[in-house]
Image (cartoon, rainbow, N blue to C red):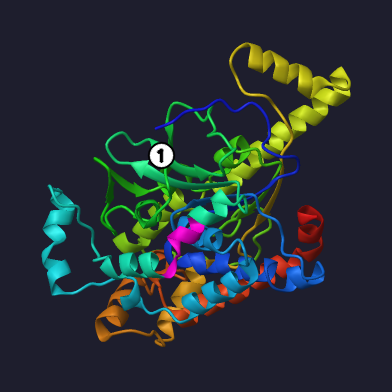
């Protein structure tokens, strides 16, 4: 592990892309990316949006690494990523058979061999084959990308580990807190798979002597490393619908006098761990920006600089404004998953279809747990279309933000 001092932005007005986690919900991120590198690129005179830093967690790490490998031609790369997601079937990602059922006691007890509910060898093969890891390293070496960060959770300590690779002239960030470890690594499939290893559902991944699981347990939207890598604008793609505000005339999520089952509750637990950080992170950054603006009004010009000088004198980090923009689903993906499962048009084997049907709790309007595992081309297409539509709804803001 290497630690180097960071004290100023890497480059002026640099842009970071932050991709959060959520299993099969990651198809929504691909939809937003396909708009950015499709219609929005055409509106910009066939000039693709510039991204200097990519920070990903869980499935966002996999999508982010794929994009990093195609920084020389992101338009073609994202088209291929769309094709991959829309042609996917459950067995191409996960395997569940009698052998996996017999291993369930080992999943519950633990042991010397890492185990999860599913056999993830198909996912390992897919990630290893479809992402050109040599091109990821080349994008960084050539300066097409200045930083790539993949978040994982170290199981033994519960700390967030940021596996990070940067362009040659870019130092690693510091000042991320005692619960965050930064390690300079040449990012490979093992880092992306570790970040995506949902606890119990997927087996943990060993890197060196340590076991890692899903980075979203503690840091689902890795905004902090994006800031420490010098980003002054951060585009965040979330995978959950905003729950507060004007939600009007929506039916309850469960029947009034019935208690939800374990699978329904497990889906909600995963939501809390993997999805619900994004709004808090963006709001916190907004409050810091507002404090700096209010300080300028009260204390006069140069407030941020004086505050930063004081912070640096005590060994802290400087303060600066960071613009953020959030694109997130306008519809509840859990509900979309329930509708898709109940229509019975699932691809894959009979076992896969029965399993996904089992994960759906018919007494509720949504199927959160199934939405994490619904690796189905038709469902992915729905989420991609939703991502494109939601990004297009913010077209003017995106154009201004990415100029």
Q: Quadrant of the N terminus?
A: top left
**Residue 22 visible in the displayed image:** no
Q: Position of 57 compared to 12: left or right?
A: left
Q: Position of 148 compared to 204: left or right?
A: right
For mark 1, give the secondary structure: strand
Which residues lie in the magenta part?
A: 130-136
Q: Residue at x 54, y 33 (%)?
A: 173
Q: Position of residue 346 (x, y in %)?
A: 39, 84
Reply above or below: 288 against 95: above
Q: Residue at x 71, y 16 (%)?
A: 309
Q: Does the magenta segment cover residue 48?
A: no
Q: Quadrant of the C terminus?
A: bottom right
**The image quarter in which residue 132 lies:** bottom left
Q: Position of residue 97 (x, y in %)?
A: 18, 74
Q: Position of residue 147 (x, y in %)?
A: 56, 46
Q: Position of 237 compared to 289: left or right?
A: left
Give neighbour class at mark 1: few <14, some 14-19, many 20+ (Cα, 10 Å).
many
Q: Position of residue 15 (x, y in %)?
A: 69, 48
């Amino acid at each position: 592990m290497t630690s180097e001092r960071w004290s100023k932005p890497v480059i002026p007005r640099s842009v970071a892309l932050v991709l959060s986690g959520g299993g099969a919900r990651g198809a929504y991120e691909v939809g937003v990316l396909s708009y950015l590198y499709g219609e929005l690129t055409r509106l910009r005179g066939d000039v693709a949006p510039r991204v200097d830093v990519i920070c990903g967690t869980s499935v966002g790490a996999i999508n982010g690494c794929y994009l990093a490998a195609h920084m020389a031609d992101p338009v073609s790369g994202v088209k291929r990523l769309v094709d991959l997601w829309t042609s996917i079937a459950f067995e191409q990602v996960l395997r569940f058979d009698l052998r996996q059922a017999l291993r369930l006691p080992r999943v519950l007890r633990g042991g010397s061999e890492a185990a999860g509910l599913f056999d993830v060898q198909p996912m390992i093969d897919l990630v290893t084959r479809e992402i050109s890891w040599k091109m990821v390293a080349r994008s960084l070496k050539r300066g097409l990308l200045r930083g790539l960060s993949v978040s994982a959770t170290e199981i033994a300590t519960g700390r967030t580990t940021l596996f990070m690779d940067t362009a040659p002239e870019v130092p690693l960030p510091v000042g991320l807190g005692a619960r965050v470890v930064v390690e300079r690594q040449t990012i490979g499939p093992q880092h992306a798979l570790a970040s995506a290893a949902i606890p119990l559902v997927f087996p943990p991944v060993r890197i060196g002597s340590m076991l890692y699981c899903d980075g979203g347990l503690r840091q689902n939207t890795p905004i902090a490393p994006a800031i420490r890598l010098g980003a002054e604008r951060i585009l965040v793609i979330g995978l959950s619908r905003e729950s507060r505000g004007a939600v009007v005339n929506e039916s309850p999520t469960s029947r009034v006098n019935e208690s939800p089952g374990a699978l329904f509750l497990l889906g909600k637990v995963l939501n809390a761990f993997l999805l619900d950080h994004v709004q808090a992170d963006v709001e916190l950054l907004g409050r810091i920006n507002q404090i700096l603006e209010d300080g300028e009004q009260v204390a006069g010009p140069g407030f941020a600089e004086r505050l930063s000088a004081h912070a640096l004198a005590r060994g802290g980090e400087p303060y600066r404004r960071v613009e953020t923009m959030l694109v997130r689903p306008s519809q509840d993906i859990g509900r979309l998953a329930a509708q898709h499962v109940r229509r019975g048009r699932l691809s894959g084997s009979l076992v896969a279809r029965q399993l996904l049907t089992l994960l759906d709790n018919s007494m509720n309007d949504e199927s959160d747990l199934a939405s994490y595992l619904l690796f189905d081309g038709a469902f992915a297409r729905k989420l991609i279309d939703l991502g494109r539509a939601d990004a297009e709804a913010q077209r003017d803001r995106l154009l201004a933000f990415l100029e």
